[in-house]
Amino acid sequence: MADIQGNESPIAKKRLRYELDWDRMIYVDDTIDEALVRKLAPEIIRLKRKSSDPITVAIDSEGGQVRSLESLLGLLESPDQRGNRCPFYTVAVNRAQSAAASLLAFGDYSVAFSHSQILFHPHWRRLSSGLSATEAIGMARDLKESDEILALRLAERVLHRKCRCFGSLEAKNRFAEATKAFPTVAAEYRQQISHGLTLLGCADPDIYEIDFVGFATALWAELSTPLDRQLVGDALVDLVRLLEFRELMTHLREGGIGAGGARKADTSARAKLSRAFELACTTVGGPEAAGRLGPEYVAQRMTELERLVSVFLMRAAKNDRWRPESEGFSQLEEDYVLLESFEEYQGNRQARDVMWNNLAELLSQEAIDGYNATEGDARKALHDTVVRPQSDFFWLFHVMMCRRLLADENRLTPTEAQLLGLVEEVLGGGAVMSRGELELQEILSGEDDDEGAAPDEEEEETKEPTAGG
């Protein structure tokens, strides 16, 4: 690139870290299935052997199978025999729907053309009509659990983008503007957030407060449709419900009413449990499902049902008018599945590291200086009772947002996807300045002296937290 005098511009002298390399591209332009994986595998291996430079994954697909998506991600993410990993940059060139939308979000750097169509929806609803009731329920449950794990992985993968979005909106004064313009929304969110932080054991944060109310309200204001905006409130409600559920389960594990309480339950409680089981069966299999399933399926489910019995009994004991229909057995069961998945998920430690690495985006400089000046027991107390509960809340809120994305049909513009952390850069400009745009700005202003630096691996390397661990 040269000017009219023939002088090279600063950009032409550098290889940009986050520039898409169309000469090192694979094209996902069909249904994501095993046939596509077999077709792309040799090309991915060839590109990895040739160079460790980033691979560009261009996407124009209506989606496909979750298992095939996992296979494709495995090929792209796996290191070579020497442990070297080749980054991959994803770009939505037209359609990125269903499994293809997840592939887009999983990129080390994710880009969308401004006209691209991004769609998330649950995978468990696409079941063959030829399945028996038992097969349909079993497959639906497996796919629901798969979506729960996918939501956790997705949340971890794009968490650093969400932190950057937080910092960008706050720097633009969007938090204050949104809470002032939409006081009713802000008040509703404040109530949910306060309750959630209390359940996480958060003390009065004082100067260390992360402005969750401002962020949630600004995010609500930036999203364009009522359905998209509903994601924010629904995620907060889901988060509080999960924390309440976890508190109940903790009480049970520490000596509260155990699963054996079901055997001591009175007739009324047993009747409620029986009705709850019927609701669980009819959720997928129809009104006659409970009678068709037979003793084998009932026995298979009893272990899981036993774990939920105590929760039902506790709810029933607190409120004589409580009925399983009022809360929904399937919803309570989904909460249990998510809680089990979350507690077993190995990515939680990595997610916490990402939170620490991006803490400067969430706290004021005064708070960071104050934290760094604190030592010994006082620092540990501040960490355990204020900073960590808030960072955990941010992470869990992000998990719930990803879970909601996969729970219903959600069509997003590229800018909305960027606000939700699913896309980092929108070609032509988005709501948040991306790492690529920031790098370009630094080069043009002459502030970047690093010649041809290698791509950052934010998710792979844990750095010392800005505010200390």
Image (cartoon, helix red, strand yellow):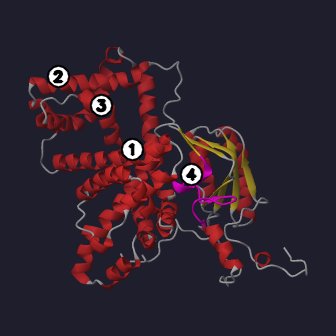
Q: Which residue is mark 4?
A: 417
Q: Based on the picture, tell me whether residue 415 belongs to the magenta stretch.
A: yes
Name the residue at 43% across, 37% down. Answer: 144
Q: Which residue is mark 1?
A: 234
Q: Amino acid at mark 4?
A: Ala
Q: Tell me where the magenta segment starts and ends, as one range.
A: 413-434
Query: Is label 4 in contact with label 3 (beta carbons under 8 Å)?
Result: no
Assign a secondary structure to mark 4: helix
380 or 398: nearer the eye? Answer: 398
Badge 4 crowding class, 10 Å Cα cut-off, few under 14, some 14 to 19, many 20 or more, is many
Give the residue drawn at x 62%, y 59%. Answer: 430
Q: Position of residue 353 (x, y in %)?
A: 42, 68
Question: Which of the two discs, 2 and 3, labels the residue nearer the N terminus?
Answer: 2
Q: x%, y% of residue 202? A: 25, 63
Q: CA distance from mark 4 to mark 3?
A: 31 Å
The image position of residue 152, as x and y in percent, is 44, 51
Q: Which residue is mark 3?
A: 328
Circle nearer the viewer, 3 or 1 = 1
Determine whether 131 is above or below 183 in the image: above
**Residue at (64%, 40%) from the top-left corner?**
32
Q: Are marks 2 and 4 in contact (CB under 8 Å)?
A: no
Labelled pair 4, 1 in contact (Cβ < 8 Å)? no
Label 1 CA crowd tier, 10 Å (few <14, some 14–19, many 20+): few
Label disc, if present, on residue 271 of the rendered structure: 2
